[in-house]
């Protein structure tokens, strides 16, 4: 959930950075892969008029296969669904072996599955699911996935704090209780829930899930006081969203490819954490939500843009909760790398 409140900079800075609990074993040996395809199944935007290039392909309007009696022939063309959520397919190839994971599932039960159908994606071929964190706009589509698969029978990697009850205090003083994930429901639908705080390697060492991210920058301070979590006895400010984690792949000869859901840990914290864990300095691509939207986060835009400019990724595809001000700043600072995100976009990355 990426809710922008009227909280100010001082309130946003009320949470001090802290290191992830426990000792991380690094560098982690992350096996380089030969090819990566990242397909955004769900994002906040769908633009059928976006053009692609040799690296990025777009999805426009589909065939006239949707019933609509107002048109001659009774059918019309539609595009993909955009909603306040995020979901991506990640396919990695190493040699002759190719495997696909689902990273997050979007907001609604139907959007991710419906968009996958329009893209011709066979969800039964998935090898696993990774959740970036427990907010409902990244997990709502799991219901649709379970319905499609019958009984899921696949691993789901997540942080043990995804079950945390959370709420948002509104400026009027009321509370908006956020939907909370149910472990019993997920396991009942056949998902093999794997809870990890520390880094995890998937697909024979080709994909790294960061686990808890070290909070080391001076400017990424997390959620404002309106974001609260239930401790079991009381509601408290939840600045860290400690279950936030990212997916990292080492593209042979090019560097790290990093996928974020919301980037609640701070995108620079995430990238530096990935570099430390893998001992790979070069960041080739960054895709996903950067959580720079709203008054509490706009002061973070400038230092984030500066740090990203220094890292010089070749592909920068921010989406979801990044926010329009940050998008403009990133596009101006990194015009050769920045591409607009949209449901139905596929980034095709090839190693050397």
Image (cartoon, grey):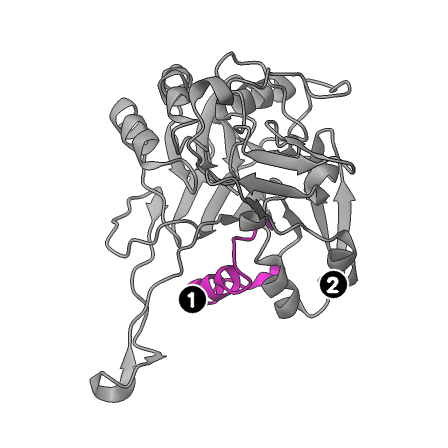
Residue 325 - label: none
Q: Is residue 206 visible?
A: no
Q: Is residue 92 above or below residue 242?
A: below
What residue do we see at 52% from left, 65% from top?
A: 110
Badge 2: how crowded within 10 Å, few (<14), some, or many (20+)?
some
Is residue 314 left or right of 192 when viewed as pictured? left
Question: Could you say which quadrant of the image residue 166 lies in?
Answer: top right
Which percent across, then down, holds residue 171? 46, 38
In front here: 106 or 166?
166
Element class at badge 2? loop
Q: Which residue is mark 1?
A: 118
Which percent across, then down, holds residue 334? 30, 25
Element class at badge 1? helix
In front here: 269 or 167?
167
Q: Is residue 86 above or below residue 281?
A: below
Is residue 218 left or right of 273 when viewed as pictured? left
Q: Which residue is mark 2?
A: 189
Q: Is residue 343 above or below residue 317?
A: below
**Discs 2, 1 touching: Cβ within 8 Å:** no
What residue do we see at 54% from left, 25% from top?
A: 222
Question: Could you say which quadrant of the image residue 264 lies in?
Answer: top right
In front here: 228 or 30?
228
Q: Residue furthest top?
A: 218
Kindly report the distance in space between the C-alpha atoms of the residues bearing marks 2 and 1: 25 Å
What residue do we see at 73% from left, 35% from top?
A: 234
Q: Is residue 305 above or below residue 181?
A: above
Is residue 77 left or right of 72 when viewed as pictured? right
> Viewer-nearest of labels 2 and 1?
2
Query: Is residue 160 in the magenta section?
Result: no
Badge 1: how crowded within 10 Å, few (<14), some, or many (20+)?
some
Sequence-wise, which precedes: disc 2 or disc 1? 1
Q: Which residues are magenta?
A: 100-125
């Amino acid at each position: 959930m990426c809710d922008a409140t009227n909280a100010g900079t001082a309130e946003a800075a009320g949470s001090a950075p802290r290191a992830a609990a426990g000792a991380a074993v690094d560098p982690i040996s992350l096996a380089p892969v030969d090819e990566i395809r990242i397909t955004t199944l769900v994002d906040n935007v769908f633009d059928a008029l976006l053009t692609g290039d040799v690296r990025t392909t777009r999805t426009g309007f589909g065939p006239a296969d949707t019933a609509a009696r107002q048109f001659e022939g009774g059918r019309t063309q539609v595009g993909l669904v955009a909603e306040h959520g995020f979901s991506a397919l990640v396919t990695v190839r190493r040699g002759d072996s190719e495997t696909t994971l689902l990273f997050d599932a979007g907001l609604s039960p139907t959007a991710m599955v419906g968009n996958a159908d329009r893209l011709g994606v066979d969800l039964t071929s998935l090898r696993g699911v990774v959740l970036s964190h427990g907010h409902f706009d990244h997990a709502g589509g799991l219901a649709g996935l379970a319905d499609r698969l019958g009984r899921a029978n696949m691993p789901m990697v997540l942080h043990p704090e995804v079950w945390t009850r959370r709420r948002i205090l509104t400026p009027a003083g009321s509370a908006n209780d956020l939907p909370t994930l149910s472990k019993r429901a997920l396991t009942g639908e056949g998902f093999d829930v794997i809870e990890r705080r520390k880094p995890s390697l998937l697909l024979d060492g080709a994909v790294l899930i960061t686990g808890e991210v070290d909070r080391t920058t001076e400017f990424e301070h997390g959620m404002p006081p309106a974001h609260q979590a239930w401790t079991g006895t009381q509601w408290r400010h939840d600045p860290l969203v400690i279950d936030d984690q990212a997916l990292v792949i080492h593209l042979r000869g090019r560097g790290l490819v990093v996928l974020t859901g919301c980037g609640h840990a701070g995108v620079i914290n995430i990238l530096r954490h990935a570099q430390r864990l893998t001992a790979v300095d070069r960041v080739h691509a960054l895709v996903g939500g950067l959580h720079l939207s709203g008054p509490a986060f706009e002061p973070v835009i400038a230092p984030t843009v500066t740090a990203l400019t220094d890292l010089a990724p070749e592909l920068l595809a921010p989406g979801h909760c990044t926010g329009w001000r940050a998008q403009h700043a990133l596009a101006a600072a990194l015009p050769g790398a920045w591409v607009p995100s949209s449901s139905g976009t596929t980034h095709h990355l090839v190693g050397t």
